[in-house]
C-alpha cells in the first residue's frame, strides 16, 4: 500500500477516532438543546409529542451533518503527510495563491517567494505552516 492510500484510509469518515470526536463534541450542544426544549415544554405546556419530535429532529440533524463535516474532526497530523504531494494551481501563485490537493483547496505560497506560477500548472508541497502550504514548481 502506498503512502497516499494509507493517508486516505486514516481519514475515512468511518474511522473510529473521527466518529468518537464527533460524538463527544456534539454531546454538550445536544444536552443543552434537550434541557432547553424540556424547560420550554414545562413553561409553555407543550404537548410531549412536540418535545419528542424536536429531540428527534435535532438528532436527525446531528446524523445528517456528519457526512458534511467529518473532515473537521479528523486528526490534524494528516497535514504534515502532504509533504511531497502534487497539487494543481487554482489561482495564480505570485507568490501566494490557492492550490487543489487531496480533494481540498488550500492557501499556498511559492517556497522561494519569487517565482510566479500560472493556473493549471502542477506544483509539489515542500512545507506546511499552519494552513498555508509551501510549494515549488515541478
Image (cartoon, grey):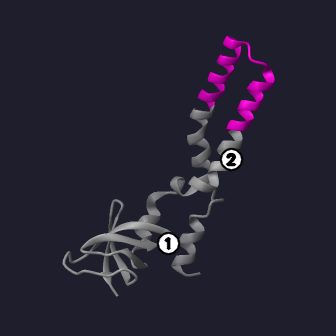
- Is 81 magenta? The answer is no
Q: State left or right for residue 65 relative to residue 76.
A: right
- Is 38 magenta? The answer is yes
Q: Mark 2 to mark 1: distance in Å?
A: 25 Å
**Residue sitting at the far bottom:** 138
For marks 2 and 1 on the same chain, the one whose residue lies earlier in the sequence: 2
User: Which quarter of the image is occupied by the C terminus?
Assistant: bottom left
Query: In this view of the protein, which residue sits in the foreground, 118 or 105?
Result: 118
For the stretch drawn in magenta, the main secondary structure is: helix
The image's mark for residue 23 is: none
Residue 32 in the image: state x and y as whole percent: 59, 27
What crowding class fits label 1: few (fewer than 14 Cα within 10 Å), some (14-19), or many (20 or more)? few
Tell me if I can see residue 51 in this picture: yes
Specify the quadrant of the image occupied by residue 60.
top right
Tell me if I can see residue 17 in this picture: no
Task: Tell me the residue at 56%/73% (across/down).
Answer: 6
Residue 74 in the image: state x and y as whole percent: 53, 57
Residue 123 in the image: state x and y as whole percent: 36, 82
**Residue sitting at the far right:** 49
Tell me which segment is drawn in magenta. Answer: 31-58
Provide the residue designation for mark 2: 63
Q: Tell me if label 2 and label 1 are in contact, CB under 8 Å.
A: no
109 relative to 60, above or below: below
Q: State left or right for residue 3 relative to residue 125.
A: right
Q: State left or right for residue 39 relative to residue 112.
A: right
Query: Callout 1: helix, strand or loop?
Result: loop
Residue 113 in the image: state x and y as whole percent: 20, 75
Provide the residue designation for mark 1: 102
109 relative to 115, above or below: above
Amino acid at each position: 500500500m502506498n503512502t497516499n492510500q494509507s493517508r486516505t484510509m486514516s481519514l475515512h469518515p468511518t474511522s473510529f477516532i473521527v466518529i468518537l470526536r464527533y460524538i463527544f463534541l456534539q454531546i454538550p450542544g445536544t444536552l443543552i438543546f434537550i434541557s432547553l426544549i424540556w424547560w420550554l415544554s414545562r413553561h409553555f405546556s407543550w404537548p410531549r409529542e412536540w418535545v419528542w419530535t424536536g429531540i428527534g429532529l435535532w438528532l436527525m440533524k446531528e446524523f445528517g451533518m456528519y457526512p458534511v463535516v467529518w473532515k473537521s474532526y479528523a486528526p490534524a497530523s494528516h497535514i504534515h503527510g502532504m509533504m511531497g504531494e502534487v497539487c494543481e494551481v487554482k489561482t495564480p501563485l505570485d507568490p501566494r495563491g490557492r492550490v487543489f490537493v487531496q480533494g481540498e483547496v488550500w492557501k499556498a505560497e511559492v517556497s522561494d517567494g519569487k517565482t510566479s506560477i500560472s493556473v493549471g500548472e502542477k506544483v509539489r508541497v515542500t512545507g506546511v505552516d499552519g494552513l498555508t502550504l509551501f510549494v515549488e514548481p515541478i
